[in-house]
Amino acid sequence: MNHRKLSAGETAGTYRITDTVTEAELLSIAKAFARRRLARGRKITQPALAFEYLQILLQDYEHEVFSAIFLDSQHRVICFEELFRGTIDAANVYPREVVKQALGCNAAAVILVHNHPSGDPEPSNADRRITQRLKEALGLVEIRVIDHILVGSEGCESFAERGYL
Protein backbone atom coordinates (compact mmCIF):
# COMPACT_ATOMS: atom_id res chain seq x y z
CA MET A 1 0.00 0.00 0.00
CA ASN A 2 1.46 3.32 -1.01
CA HIS A 3 0.47 6.19 1.22
CA ARG A 4 2.69 9.05 2.28
CA LYS A 5 2.02 8.44 5.99
CA LEU A 6 2.48 4.65 5.92
CA SER A 7 5.57 2.49 5.71
CA ALA A 8 5.84 -1.27 5.46
CA GLY A 9 6.06 -3.12 8.76
CA GLU A 10 8.47 -5.93 9.55
CA THR A 11 5.82 -8.59 8.91
CA ALA A 12 4.13 -8.89 5.52
CA GLY A 13 0.76 -7.16 5.50
CA THR A 14 1.60 -4.84 8.39
CA TYR A 15 2.25 -1.10 8.26
CA ARG A 16 3.62 1.67 10.45
CA ILE A 17 2.05 5.09 10.58
CA THR A 18 4.93 7.52 10.06
CA ASP A 19 3.12 10.76 10.82
CA THR A 20 -0.01 12.02 12.54
CA VAL A 21 -3.18 11.08 10.64
CA THR A 22 -6.60 12.64 10.83
CA GLU A 23 -9.78 10.61 11.10
CA ALA A 24 -10.56 11.45 7.45
CA GLU A 25 -7.12 10.21 6.36
CA LEU A 26 -7.56 7.03 8.40
CA LEU A 27 -10.92 6.36 6.75
CA SER A 28 -9.39 7.06 3.34
CA ILE A 29 -6.61 4.55 4.05
CA ALA A 30 -9.16 1.95 5.21
CA LYS A 31 -11.21 2.46 2.03
CA ALA A 32 -8.08 2.08 -0.11
CA PHE A 33 -7.30 -1.22 1.63
CA ALA A 34 -10.91 -2.38 1.16
CA ARG A 35 -10.76 -1.57 -2.57
CA ARG A 36 -7.53 -3.57 -2.82
CA ARG A 37 -9.23 -6.57 -1.19
CA LEU A 38 -11.97 -6.37 -3.82
CA ALA A 39 -9.49 -5.97 -6.67
CA ARG A 40 -9.14 -8.14 -9.74
CA GLY A 41 -8.03 -11.69 -9.05
CA ARG A 42 -9.03 -11.91 -5.37
CA LYS A 43 -11.04 -15.05 -4.67
CA ILE A 44 -14.27 -14.78 -2.69
CA THR A 45 -15.39 -18.16 -1.40
CA GLN A 46 -17.67 -17.04 1.46
CA PRO A 47 -19.77 -13.91 2.04
CA ALA A 48 -17.98 -13.19 5.31
CA LEU A 49 -14.74 -12.63 3.39
CA ALA A 50 -16.29 -9.61 1.69
CA PHE A 51 -18.37 -8.22 4.60
CA GLU A 52 -15.67 -6.15 6.27
CA TYR A 53 -14.49 -4.55 3.03
CA LEU A 54 -17.99 -3.81 1.78
CA GLN A 55 -18.97 -2.31 5.12
CA ILE A 56 -15.95 0.02 5.04
CA LEU A 57 -16.81 1.12 1.49
CA LEU A 58 -20.59 1.54 1.79
CA GLN A 59 -21.71 2.15 5.37
CA ASP A 60 -21.13 5.93 5.40
CA TYR A 61 -23.27 6.86 2.39
CA GLU A 62 -26.33 8.93 3.24
CA HIS A 63 -28.15 7.45 0.24
CA GLU A 64 -28.59 3.93 -1.10
CA VAL A 65 -25.91 2.68 -3.46
CA PHE A 66 -26.49 -0.54 -5.38
CA SER A 67 -23.27 -2.27 -6.41
CA ALA A 68 -22.03 -5.57 -7.73
CA ILE A 69 -18.91 -7.69 -7.49
CA PHE A 70 -18.45 -9.38 -10.85
CA LEU A 71 -16.68 -12.75 -10.63
CA ASP A 72 -15.12 -15.24 -13.02
CA SER A 73 -15.96 -18.95 -13.04
CA GLN A 74 -13.55 -19.56 -10.12
CA HIS A 75 -15.19 -16.78 -8.04
CA ARG A 76 -12.21 -14.46 -8.48
CA VAL A 77 -13.04 -10.78 -8.61
CA ILE A 78 -13.15 -9.22 -12.05
CA CYS A 79 -14.31 -5.85 -10.72
CA PHE A 80 -16.42 -4.11 -8.08
CA GLU A 81 -18.79 -1.50 -9.51
CA GLU A 82 -21.20 0.97 -7.97
CA LEU A 83 -24.11 0.75 -10.42
CA PHE A 84 -27.01 2.83 -9.09
CA ARG A 85 -27.43 5.67 -6.62
CA GLY A 86 -30.73 6.30 -4.88
CA THR A 87 -32.28 8.25 -2.04
CA ILE A 88 -32.18 7.74 1.72
CA ASP A 89 -34.36 4.64 1.55
CA ALA A 90 -34.45 3.36 -2.04
CA ALA A 91 -32.50 3.00 -5.27
CA ASN A 92 -33.94 2.27 -8.69
CA VAL A 93 -32.22 -0.85 -10.02
CA TYR A 94 -32.53 -1.73 -13.70
CA PRO A 95 -31.91 -5.43 -14.47
CA ARG A 96 -31.03 -4.62 -18.09
CA GLU A 97 -28.13 -2.43 -16.95
CA VAL A 98 -26.86 -5.05 -14.49
CA VAL A 99 -26.94 -7.72 -17.22
CA LYS A 100 -25.19 -5.34 -19.64
CA GLN A 101 -22.42 -4.62 -17.13
CA ALA A 102 -22.02 -8.32 -16.25
CA LEU A 103 -21.70 -9.25 -19.92
CA GLY A 104 -19.26 -6.39 -20.47
CA CYS A 105 -17.07 -7.79 -17.68
CA ASN A 106 -17.44 -11.33 -19.04
CA ALA A 107 -18.66 -12.38 -15.59
CA ALA A 108 -19.70 -15.93 -14.78
CA ALA A 109 -21.18 -14.95 -11.41
CA VAL A 110 -22.12 -11.87 -9.44
CA ILE A 111 -22.51 -10.82 -5.83
CA LEU A 112 -25.10 -8.08 -5.52
CA VAL A 113 -24.47 -5.50 -2.83
CA HIS A 114 -26.27 -2.48 -1.49
CA ASN A 115 -26.27 -0.38 1.63
CA HIS A 116 -29.03 0.69 3.98
CA PRO A 117 -28.28 4.25 5.15
CA SER A 118 -30.47 3.62 8.22
CA GLY A 119 -27.71 1.31 9.45
CA ASP A 120 -30.00 -1.72 9.74
CA PRO A 121 -29.00 -4.39 7.18
CA GLU A 122 -32.29 -6.31 7.51
CA PRO A 123 -33.58 -7.23 4.01
CA SER A 124 -36.88 -5.66 2.94
CA ASN A 125 -39.52 -7.22 0.70
CA ALA A 126 -38.36 -4.86 -2.07
CA ASP A 127 -34.81 -6.18 -1.61
CA ARG A 128 -36.06 -9.74 -2.01
CA ARG A 129 -38.11 -8.86 -5.11
CA ILE A 130 -35.26 -7.10 -6.94
CA THR A 131 -32.91 -9.96 -6.06
CA GLN A 132 -35.32 -12.42 -7.66
CA ARG A 133 -35.73 -10.24 -10.76
CA LEU A 134 -31.96 -9.91 -11.14
CA LYS A 135 -31.44 -13.62 -10.58
CA GLU A 136 -33.94 -14.39 -13.35
CA ALA A 137 -32.52 -11.79 -15.77
CA LEU A 138 -28.90 -12.85 -15.21
CA GLY A 139 -29.88 -16.51 -15.37
CA LEU A 140 -31.09 -16.01 -18.93
CA VAL A 141 -27.49 -15.31 -19.95
CA GLU A 142 -26.06 -18.00 -17.65
CA ILE A 143 -24.64 -15.67 -15.01
CA ARG A 144 -25.17 -16.94 -11.45
CA VAL A 145 -26.21 -14.68 -8.59
CA ILE A 146 -24.30 -16.21 -5.70
CA ASP A 147 -25.30 -13.68 -3.06
CA HIS A 148 -26.91 -10.35 -2.28
CA ILE A 149 -25.21 -8.62 0.63
CA LEU A 150 -26.87 -5.79 2.53
CA VAL A 151 -24.56 -3.40 4.33
CA GLY A 152 -25.35 -1.20 7.29
CA SER A 153 -23.38 0.37 10.10
CA GLU A 154 -24.83 -2.40 12.32
CA GLY A 155 -23.31 -5.13 10.14
CA CYS A 156 -23.99 -7.09 6.97
CA GLU A 157 -26.62 -9.64 5.97
CA SER A 158 -26.21 -12.30 3.30
CA PHE A 159 -29.14 -13.60 1.27
CA ALA A 160 -27.19 -16.83 0.64
CA GLU A 161 -26.61 -17.40 4.36
CA ARG A 162 -30.30 -16.76 5.06
CA GLY A 163 -31.32 -19.26 2.39
CA TYR A 164 -33.02 -16.64 0.17
CA LEU A 165 -31.09 -17.69 -2.96
Image: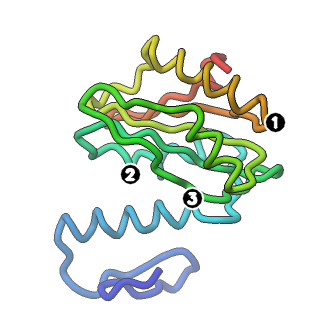
Query: Badge 1 local density, few (<14 within 10 Å), some, or many (20+)?
Result: few
Which amino acid, by three-letter code, is at mark 1? Answer: Glu
Q: Quadrant of residue 43?
A: bottom right
Q: Secondary structure at mark 2?
A: helix
Q: Residue at x 40, y 30 (%)?
A: 92
Q: Is residue 72 left or right of residue 36?
A: right
Q: Quadrant of residue 45?
A: top right
Query: Badge 3 local density, few (<14 within 10 Å), some, or many (20+)?
Result: many
- Indicate which disc residue 163 carries: none
Q: Earlier in the sequence, mark 3 or mark 2?
A: 3
Q: Earlier in the sequence, mark 2 or mark 1?
A: 2
Q: Which residue is mark 2?
A: 56
Q: Secondary structure at mark 3?
A: loop
Up the image or down, 36 lies above or below 8; here it is above
Up the image or down, 3 lies above or below 147; here it is below
Q: Which residue is mark 1?
A: 142
- Quote the CA–CA distance across marks 1 and 3: 23 Å
Which amino acid, by three-letter code, is at mark 3? Answer: Leu
Q: Secondary structure at mark 1?
A: loop
- Quote the CA–CA distance across marks 3 and 2: 12 Å
Q: Residue at x 57, y 32 (%)?
A: 95
Q: Which residue is mark 3?
A: 38
Residue 115 image offset from top left, x and y in percent:
38, 36
Q: Quadrant of residue 41?
A: bottom right
Query: Badge 2 local density, few (<14 within 10 Å), some, or many (20+)?
Result: many
- Quote the CA–CA distance across marks 2 and 1: 31 Å
Residue 16 image offset from top left, x and y in percent:
37, 82
Q: Residue at x 71, y 33 (%)?
A: 138
Q: Earlier in the sequence, mark 1 or mark 3?
A: 3
